[in-house]
Amino acid sequence: MDDPGTTADPGDFDEGSGEAQDFPAEPHSEQSTVETSETSASENAYWRENIRLLVSLMVIWFACSFGAGILFRDFLDQFNLGGYPLGFWFAQQGSIYIFIALIFFYVVRMKQIERKYDLDD
Amino acid sequence: METQTLIYLFVGASFALYIGIAIWSRAGSTKEFYVAGGGVNPVVNGMATAADWMSAASFLSMAGLIAFMGYDASVYLMGWTGGYVMLALLLAPYLRKFGQFTVPDFIGTRYYSKAARVVAVICLIFISFTYIAGQMRGVGIVFSQFLDVSIFWGVIIGMGIVFIYAVLGGMKGITYTQVAQYCVLITAYMVPAFFISFMLTGTPLPQIGLGSVVQDGSGMYMLERLDNVLVELGFNQYTAGSKSMIDMFCITMALMVGTAGLPHVIVRFFTVPKASDARKSAGWALIFIALLYTTAPAIGAFGMYNLINKVDGVAYSEVEPFFTNWEDADLYAWQDKNGDGVMQYRPGAAFEGKPEFTGETGPSGERIVANAPNMESENEVYVDRDTLVLANPEIADLPGWVVALMAAGGLAAALSTAAGLLLVISSSVSHDLLKSTFAPNISAKGELLAARLAATAAICVAGYLGIYPPGWVAQVVAFAFGLAASSLFPAIFMGIFFKSMNKEGAIAGMVSGLVFTFSYILYFKLVNPAANVADNWLFGISPEGIGVIGMLINFGVAIAVASMTAKTPQEIRKLVDSIRVPRGAGEAHAH
């Protein structure tokens, strides 16, 4: 069964709970109030920083594809990049390059954030 | 050597390679069968994902679509790449940390509900089968075009190959054959593109060539020249669009979100060792995909330019052999409406429907079509859009081995995607339906056998759909993306980011998003296709883009229902906390 398998691993990084959770087979053995406090401060800070990063990257993602490639393309088309009208370039080339850059930026930045909070894998 | 001999040689060699890899990488356990053992290098997985993702449609049809749609086709380019940003940032690392085998696994566990799991399996099977029928069809078409094999035998051979490596090798076999298939398909796509770009613009790199000056003495940029040529003939400008902005927006969004919700893409990220590798792997996948996707607009524009130059205003008796070759294959046709012996290429259909050849030849030597001419248009030429990529090497007079490479590439694209889809179908049956829902006591060996039997059955169904395609197959591809966008994506996303999303909310959301999108597409595509015009659409959104509204409905209903029902149980909140941090993904497998 998968349920014990997945509930088993939060135990790996619970801090300060002290009690040994050898067997997750008895799901009702744990106090819920104890568990809520188990999300440590560093995990919360890590998650907040991740969300901030995600939001800013998704804004760029939206701006280069939906913004430059669709909503503002008519305006951008008055400029040229080589023989490409700029809006058309964003729609058929540029947005794809920016997508790649976004993912790799996220990869590098997340690794730094995870190291900072000592949560990397 | 004869081109035909070369084709047999290239296709035969590539098949031998795939089978060799399959035998070398047989799966011995359920973990190897479902997720290739979970130890695949992220770059290798990225390459396999790219092959998995790029189907017969990407390889054969996309450049043709771009050629005939111009700017409007940007929806496919952005839509089918932008989804990887969502995958890398919003889904893949967390699903990998969760560390199970299938997408319904995640939904069933996160929403602590067998019903949610079964709803997810239904979505998954529907999405995957619509998709796979097209792949087997692609295999059949490539065979019949290049190898003088009928579509029937083409599909049978394709089924045989996929059977060997998908059923024996499972995800492990598929991963390594997909790497080989990516290499074959990308070489096949890029080589003719380099040649053609160099011939037209003097720049071998097609991404640069499309923005360069065309070498026909006009001194104009390629896109400018193409715009002029098309406008002279009465077409829209290539770089202008005809779709409304809201429709462009919604189709792009539906394709992006749909991409991020496609199960056969998501499971690829279960195969890497760590959560951080899943992010990296999505980045590599997009690089490998972008190679083809940034080349396709150039192939489309160059192909259109070549086609017009070599067809319009040319007497049929002097046309180059590529035209008559494709005419012999029933895919091009010319109807001399004004009787001047010269071909006119103009907007509008030359005649009604697909060409039906009478078997007689006309005064210029053309094959006569029985179709009623469309007198509202001066156009005399029928060109099947899907031929653009395959015809490219011939139009550009490239050597025979390039044509042979194209055949092998088209087959690689179709086979790799078909195999990936078969795997998610079989694992959802053996793992989600049997092991996790209806037969929890099944042994690991029995589960593996069930997975192999399910894969075999799925291959047979897919083959049948490929040989006898129901008329609706082409009509309902929009289903796959729309349904993924409106059902699976919101459920997975909320499962990670909204800790308070409970099972009632998730199930109500999935069902309402699914039912809405399904009915809208069903109505406009099958029930009442005549009404499928912008005036009748909800907010002017076509069935291709309606998945976005389905997704919003899913989010809205889910949040409303969740706020009125019981809170998420404590152990599920803990589970969400655990998937949010990457540490510990390595030990996640409990099986």
Image: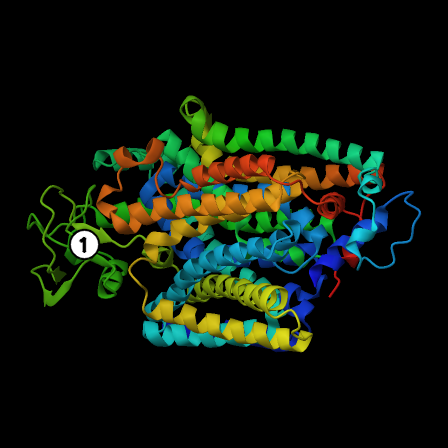
Q: Where is residue B464 in the image (x, y as percent from the top left)?
A: 37, 71
Looking at the image, which residue is at 68% across and 39% down?
B499
Q: In which quarter of the image is residue B573?
A: top right
Q: Quadrant of residue B27?
A: bottom right
| B562 on left or right of A70 | right
Q: Where is residue B134 in the image (x, y as percent from the top left)?
A: 39, 61
SS at circle 1? loop
Label 1: few (<14), some (14–19) or many (≥20) C-alpha neighbours in 10 Å: few
Tell which of B179 and B556 is nearer to you: B556
Residue annotated with mark 1: B353
- Note whether residue A120 is visible: yes
Q: Colour scheme used in the picture?
A: rainbow
Looking at the image, which residue is at 48% across and 44% down?
B486
| B17 on left or right of A3 | left
Q: In this view, does B187 lie above or below B84?
A: below
Tell which of B55 and B211 is nearer to you: B55
Q: In this view, does B102 lie above or below A52?
A: below
